[in-house]
Each structure stands twice: as structure tokens, then as C-alpha cells.
Image: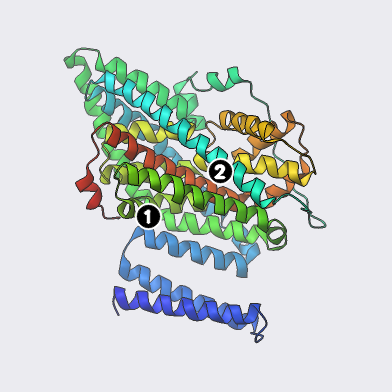
Amino acid sequence: MNKKKSGLLAVGLFTVTAIIHLIDIYKFQSVNPNALRVIRWIFILSLILYAIYKKSLTTWILTSMVIGVEIGLDFPEFAKNLKVLSNIFLRLVKTIIAPILFSTLVVGIAGHSDLKQVGRMGWKSVLYFEVVTTIALIIGLIAINISQAGVGIHIPAGFHEELPKSAPHSWQEIILDIFPENFVKSIYHGDVLPIVVFSIIFGIALAIIDEQKRKPMLLFSESLAETMFRFTNIIMYFAPFGVGGAIAVTVGHLGLDILFSLMKLLLTLYVALIAFVGGVLFSIAYFFKIPIKQFIRAVSEPVSIAFATTSSESALPIAMENMEKFGVPRKIVSFVLPTGYTFNLDGTTLYLSLASVFAAQAAGMHMPISTQIVMGLTLMLTSKGVAGVPRASLVILIGTASSFGLPLWPIMAILGIDELMDMARTSVNVIGNTLASCVIARWEGEFDREKALAFEPN
């Protein structure tokens, strides 16, 4: 047995498994549920065999997702206990965020002493972010107005969900949240943007002092950055367990009733996100001459992690490392990616515009396009900085819905499938931000295309 043979075996067993399940679903022939379960586990064993021969972390992550789905289906009560695995992984990742952002930004700014480039990258990034998120907003509005997913929606009997508390934020508070009140406090709360702002100012201050005093701190920052990247490599070995646990919890918690009831909304979101990635992001990659095939390979691992954990923050360290291997200079990666996690939430923006109109449709309220656009722009503004928090966008949606006089019961229905929706929008957030780092690098004339073409995943 080798990698090729084990891969063919897995594909063959998947085909057989799919055919048998279709026969059972469409009642061509009734199949014993236990037999179906055994067939699925045989297929999973073939996947594990392929992962052993493949020796790729990405393959193990994808395999663990399949295992997590099966555990959630077969043992839903046990699956709920696996949340501890995803929580361990998320905690380990969160310990990396602050030191890796601080060290890479300081080295990127003070190590090159090119303060003009920092300002140039800043306005280019913000311009790119706002153009792309506005396109995402428009696609979300178009998708929900075409599908009319909220019309005729009903909540299954006995369905109860507790809505998260929503504290409205004024525009002054949103701006204040950008600036660090206390660096240690920002680290404790995992607030990415204040950490970025502090690190940029620190790097600028370090860049303008004399060489003798700058060098020790610069060497420390370089050493810290390298150490944290090695730290990332170590904890990524736990990623398959964390990802598998997260998927198992999601499948075990959801069941199928609420999913079928809201399938139209779910499909609308996924189709809209796929259209955005394929029609907009890949077009941008093609225009800027970024190798799309290698780019997909570079983002597959961080996207898999983001999909399972529903947190863009969990994918940040490995995304930064892969983008650097892909040919984007560290100084650009360390600036654009964390900044994008606040200003470039493509998937979240698309979801929020879609979900807000869904709430109006479900309540039978007519909302003119002009009002939809104003509400979408409001959501785009208030959603800044939610990338690191799983399902935080739901809180933003509730606050905005209240402001526009929308009922909350449709949002309560959305909560039932929000985990599945969060997986998709978070994945698109990661794809959008990694692509943004490539675009800014190309715009700056520093993208290494040869390195990108030679990219190999871990």
C-alpha cells in the first residue's frame, strides 16, 4: 500500500458509501441503519490510512472533520463532551496572537525603518478592504432578494433558543475601541486591533531612535517572532483533535429538524459566498497575477481550522506563516492580515446583509432597497473587529435589527443554524484577508511569484 493506492481506495469507498446512502434516502431499497453506520466507518478508516501515507497536516485536519461529523451523528450526547478539545486548541492559539503580532509588526517597521511604506500600506489596505466588503454587501442583498428565503418561514414546534445580550455601541465607542487603553488588558481580552495599533506606534518609536538603543529591542523582537512561529508549528499538531471536536459538537448539537426548516436560508448564504469567492476574490487574484492553484493550497489549512472552530483568530498564526512561505514579505503579512481581521470581514458583511433582510422577509415587512442599503452599511460599520469571536456577528445583527425596528424571533430561528453559517462566513473572512496580503504585496512590488509557484503545504 502507498499514498496513491490508499487515495484510490478512499475515493472508491466514498463512491460506494454515497451510492448506498442515496439508495436508502430515495427508498429504492431500505438499508439497515447499523449497516449504513458500519459502511461510513469503513470509509473513515480508509481516510485515516490515506492520511498516514500522505503525512500532511492539512489532510489530517480534513480527516478529523469527517470523523467529527460521524461522531456527532452516531453519538450526539458523547459528541457534546468533545467541546473541551476545541477549547484547548483555541486557548493555545490565543496565547500566540499578541506576541506574534507585536514581534512581527515591530520587526517589519523598525527593522526596515521605512515609515513611508507603513503609511502607504495603510491607505492601500483600507481602500482595498472597503471596496471588497462593499461588493460582498451588495452580493448578500442581491442573493436574499432573489431567493426570498425568509418568505413563509416557520419555527419548528418546541424550538427555543436564548438570544445573546446585545449592548448597542455608538460610533464614538467603536472608534475608541481601536485604541489601546492598556496593552496588557488588550492581550487579556484578545482585542486584535488595539494590539496592532500599539505595536505599530511602538515600531515607529523604535525606528526613530538611534541604532545603539534600537538594536537590542529589535533582536529581541526578531527572536520572539521566530520562537512564536515555532510555537505555532508545535500546537498545530493538536489542530486535528481541536477541529474534530469542534465539528462533532456542532453536528451533535444541531440535529436535523431546524436545519431542514431553514435550509433555503443556509443554501442562499453558501451559494452567495461561493459566488463571491469564485467571482470576486479569484478574479482579483487573476488580475494581480497571483497563482490561484498554489494560493488555494496555501489557504486550505487555515481555512479548515477557521471552518471548524468558527473563529478567524484561530487561523491567524498558520495563515501568517503560510502567506510568508507563499511569497508575501513578513512586514506586509504582519500588517495586512491582523488589520484585515478588523476592516476586511467579507464573509461576515455578506452574511449580515443577507440575514437582516431575511428577518424582515420572515416578519412580512416590506423593506425598500434604499433602506436595505443603509442597514447594510450600518452593519458593515458595526461589525468591525468581530472576527476573533465565534458567533459575535449575531450580537451585531440583534443590535442593528432593534435599531431598524425588525422583530427578533427570525434571528432566534437563525441562531439554530448559526454555527453552520458561521463556519462558511469565517472561512471566507480568512480567504479574503490572505488574498488581501498578496494584493498589497503585489501593489508594493514585493510579491515573490517564484516562491508562490514553489509553495508546498506542511
Residue 10, located in which quarter of the rendered image?
A: bottom left
**In-front residue for pair 360/306:** 360
Image vertical order of residue 196 relative to residue 49, above or below: above
Q: What is the x, y in percent for residue 286?
A: 34, 47
Residue 199, located in which quarter of the rendered image?
A: top left
Q: Residue furthest left?
A: 212
Image vertical order of residue 225 relative to residue 416, above or below: above
Q: Residue furthest right?
A: 157
Q: Kindly identify which numbered label has been placed on residue 237.
A: 1
Frontmost of labels 2 and 1 is 2
Q: What is the x, y in percent for residue 432?
A: 43, 42
Q: What is the x, y in percent for residue 423?
A: 54, 51
**In-front residue for pair 139/228:** 139
Residue 38, located in which quarter of the rendered image?
A: bottom right
Q: Give the class, few, some or many, for how many residues have Cα within 10 Å of label 1's Cα (few <14, many ≥20).
A: some
Q: What is the x, y in percent for residue 374?
A: 64, 29
Residue annotated with mark 2:
139
Image vertical order of residue 335 relative to residue 316, above or below: above
Q: Secondary structure at mark 1?
A: helix
At 41% from the left and 26% from the top, the residue drawn is 196
**In-front residue for pair 407/175:** 407
Label 2, label 1: how far apart the Cα atoms are: 37 Å
Q: Kindly identify which numbered label has been placed on residue 397.
A: none
Q: Give the class, few, some or many, for how many residues have Cα within 10 Å of label 2's Cα (few <14, many ≥20).
A: many
Q: Residue furthest bottom?
A: 29
At 69% from the left and 39% from the top, the residue drawn is 164
Tell me if residue 91 can be seen.
no
Mark 2 belongs to which amino acid?
Ile
Mark 1 belongs to which amino acid?
Tyr
Q: Earlier in the sequence, mark 2 or mark 1?
A: 2
Q: Give the left or right position of residue 255, taking residue 341 as reference.
A: right
Image vertical order of residue 261 relative to residue 223, above or below: below
